Amino acid sequence: MKQGIEEKITRVYQHYEIRKTGRKRLICGPYWFGYWQENGKQRRVYIGKEMPAGLKYLIDGRFKKPGYKNYAWPGRAR
């Protein structure tokens, strides 16, 4: 990740990719992406397969719903 971008990131999301190889489905990931707003546009950057320690505060207090791969805030109906 480029230097100085970590301070701009306001949201992080975890992404899984499903690849089909013949009859098998291969789940790859998790891949972490960071998002922020700049000049009225949403920007996205690939963080990596592991969440850096400096960004863990963005998912503190969140949980994974059963059957879902993304983190959600407690009490949020989604």
Image (cartoon, rainbow, N blue to C red):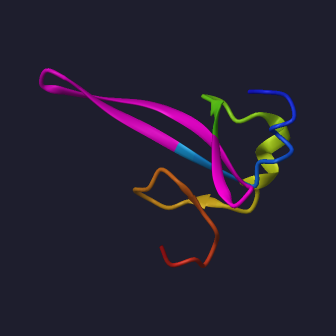
Across and down, in percent, residue 29 comes to 48, 31
Front-most of 60 and 44?
44
Front-most of 34 and 29?
34
Tell me: residue 52, above or below residue 69: above
Front-most of 56 and 47?
47
Across and down, in percent, residue 65 comes to 50, 61
Magenta extent: 15-44
**In the picture, residue 27 is in which quadrant?**
top left
**In the picture, residue 56 is in which quadrant?**
top right
Please give left or right for residue 49 compared with residue 78 in the image.
right
Tell me: residue 35, above or below residue 29: below
Across and down, in percent, residue 68 comes to 44, 56
Tell me: residue 36, above or below residue 77: above
**In the picture, residue 2 is in which quadrant?**
top right
The residue lying at 74 percent from left, 62 percent from top is 61
The residue lying at 82 percent from left, 47 percent from top is 8
Q: Is residue 19 magenta?
A: yes
Image quadrant in which the N terminus is located: top right
Across and down, in percent, residue 50 comes to 66, 30
Q: Residue furthest left?
A: 23
Q: Is residue 62 magenta?
A: no
The residue lying at 40 percent from left, 56 percent from top is 67
* Chief SS of the magenta region: strand
Q: Count of labels shown? A: 0
The residue lying at 54 percent from left, 34 percent from top is 31
Q: Residue furthest front?
A: 39
Front-most of 38 and 11?
38
